Image: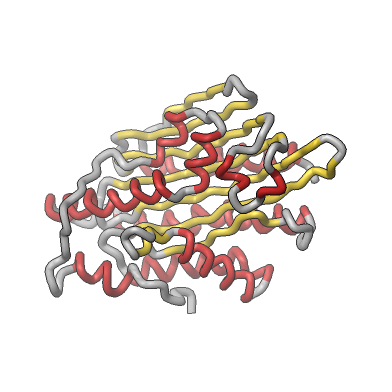
């Protein structure tokens, strides 16, 4: 295990992604370097009111603490009370154009230590797409890229991570998915079933797949005309994004419970959101098609 190697990769990943996104948008991301009183810090890169991105951020964080927060031990009670080291890159991008999907990607590494006990390490992360006016071509491309990233570890492993994503990014109180899925994994390596080098390689493969998965989609759709009615529906669906992040998302809960920097944690929130009472899409509309054809788990990469 080499935490310094992981940190170097994550910082490079953030730089590569931000450079590509700046070139696409034409406006630079602001840089905000911060320190955490309890230990560690990070670099937040944010764009607001860009030429293409209405809001987006790509964060690197590396924090330490004396005791694992509840969100990290809910399923791992044996780690309660251990000191921790956590690092990762997390990004969320909200385009202005409703024909361009929101995207999320995260890769992270944890080490839990205790006196006279062997350290426990694991990787986690994922990538998922949240369209508003979805196109099958885009969703298929995204899932093909996700599958290609995991196939070196086998078809079964791809299906496990794809299905895990479908389960994880699901709003139980709405009984609907947040988006069209992608990949999700956690606790990779914690049980000793995979070597560090292989677990790290798979995590890198997910992180490195991001630009290939997302940039071709927004390049195709960036100039698609849109109406105020379509922007209104985008704002309504963004409400589901907010609900998931504040109620279910483990990364958000970990950041807040561990005393992380709130501004950086909540950079994932969309800038404009609307809620409506008991709204239903009109039959035969593009809005209904999102619900009936896309917000349904499918084997998009088949």
Check the image and tell me how it is coloured: secondary structure
Tell me residue 203's x, y (percent).
64, 54
**Residue in the picture at 31% in, 36% down:** 50
Q: Is residue 18 left or right of residue 77?
A: left
Tell me residue 194's x, y (percent).
76, 61
Q: Quadrant of residue 237?
A: bottom left
Q: Is residue 92 left or right of residue 227?
A: right
Front-most of residues 144 and 277: 277
Q: Please tell me whether residue 108 is drawn above or below residue 127 in the rendered image.
A: above
Name the outermost residue toward the top.
37
Front-most of residues 228 and 86: 86
Q: Quadrant of residue 229?
A: bottom left
**Residue in the picture at 50% in, 63% down:** 165
**Residue in the picture at 67% in, 68% down:** 152
Q: Is residue 103 left or right of residue 291?
A: right
Tell me residue 196's x, y (percent).
77, 53
**Residue in the picture at 52% in, 62% down:** 183
Total numbered circles: 0
Q: Quadrant of residue 112?
A: top right
Name the outermost residue toward the bottom.
302
Tell me residue 266's x, y (percent).
41, 36
Front-most of residues 130 and 222: 130
Q: Please tell me whether residue 28 is drawn above or below residue 175 in the rendered image.
A: above
């Amino acid at each position: 295990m080499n935490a310094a190697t992981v940190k170097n990769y994550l910082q490079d990943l953030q730089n590569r992604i931000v450079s590509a996104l700046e070139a696409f948008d034409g406006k630079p991301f602001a840089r905000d370097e911060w320190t955490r009183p309890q230990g560690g810090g990070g670099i937040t890169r944010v764009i607001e009111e860009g030429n293409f991105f209405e809001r987006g951020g790509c964060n690197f964080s590396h924090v330490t603490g004396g005791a694992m927060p509840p969100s990290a031990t809910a399923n791992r009670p044996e780690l309660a009370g251990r000191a921790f080291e956590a690092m990762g890159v997390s990004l969320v991008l909200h385009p202005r154009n409703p024909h361009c999907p929101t995207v999320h990607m995260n890769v992270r590494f944890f080490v839990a230590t205790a006196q006279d006990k062997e350290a426990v390490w694991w990787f986690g992360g994922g990538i998922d797409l949240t369209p508003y006016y979805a196109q099958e071509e885009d969703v298929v491309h995204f899932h093909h890229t996700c599958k290609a990233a995991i196939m070196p570890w086998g078809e079964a492993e791809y299906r496990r991570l794809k299905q895990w994503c479908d389960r994880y990014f699901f709003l139980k109180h709405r009984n609907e998915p947040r988006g069209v899925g992608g990949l999700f994994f956690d606790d990779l390596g914690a049980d000793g079933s995979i070597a560090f080098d292989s677990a790290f390689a798979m995590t890198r493969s997910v992180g490195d797949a991001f630009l290939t998965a997302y940039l071709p989609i927004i390049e195709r759709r960036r100039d698609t005309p849109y109406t105020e009615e379509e922007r209104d529906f985008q704002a309504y669906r963004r409400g589901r994004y907010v609900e998931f992040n504040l109620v279910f998302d483990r990364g958000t809960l970990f950041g807040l419970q561990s005393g992380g920097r709130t501004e950086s944690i909540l950079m994932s929130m969309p800038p404009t959101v609307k809620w409506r009472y008991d709204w239903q899409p009109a039959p035969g509309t593009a809005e209904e098609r999102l619900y009936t054809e896309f917000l349904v788990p499918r084997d998009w990469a088949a």
